[in-house]
Amino acid sequence: MKKLLCILFGVALAGGVSAQNAVQEPVKKAETKVQKQQLKNDIKEKRSDEKTVRDDLSHGKVARAKADHKEVKDDKADIQKDASKLEKNGVDRPKAKARKEIKEEGQTK
C-alpha cells in the first residue's frame, strides 16, 4: 500500500511539473525585425546623447552635462532591454550586430 501511494504521488508530481512548462510560441520574423530596428535607433540615440554630454563638459557646463548623462543612462537601459528580448528570441549577439550594421550604413553613405 505504501509503495502504491508513493508511486501515485510521484506520477502526480511529475504530471504537475510537466504541465507547468509552457510551450513558447515562435516569434515572427517581422517582430524581430522591428526589435532590431528599435535597438539600432536606441544605439544611435545613445551616441548622440553621449556627444552632447562631451560638448557640454568641454564648454564647462557641468550641470547640463550631468542632466544629459541621465538620458544616456536611460538609453543604456533601453538597449539592454531590447537586446535581452532579441536574445530570448534566438538572435545571437544583437548589440554587436546592430553596431556593425550602423557602421556599415555610415560607410555606404
Image (tube, rainbow, N blue to C red):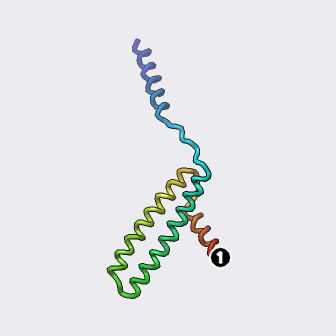
Say few, some or many: other residues with alpha carbon within 10 Å of mark 1 (under 14 / 14 to 19 / 20 or more). Answer: few
In this rendered view, identify the residue nearer to me: 109 or 9. 109
Residue lying at the far right of the rendered structure: 108
Relative to 39, is 21 above or below?
above
Instruction: Answer with left or right where residue 32 lies relative to residue 56.
Output: right
Q: Image quadrant of residue 76?
A: bottom left
In the rendering, at what x and y percent does residue 51 appear? 46, 79
In this rendered view, identify the residue nearer to me: 103 or 33. 33
Q: At x 54% / y 57%, what residue is drawn?
A: 35
Q: Quadrant of the N terminus?
A: top left
Residue type highlighted by circle 1: Gln
Instruction: Answer with left or right where residue 101 lies relative to residue 62.
Output: right
Q: Quadrant of the C terminus?
A: bottom right
Q: At x 57% / y 52%, what residue is drawn?
A: 31
Relative to 106, is 89 above or below?
above
Relative to 88, is 57 above or below?
below
Q: Return the residue at label 1.
A: 107
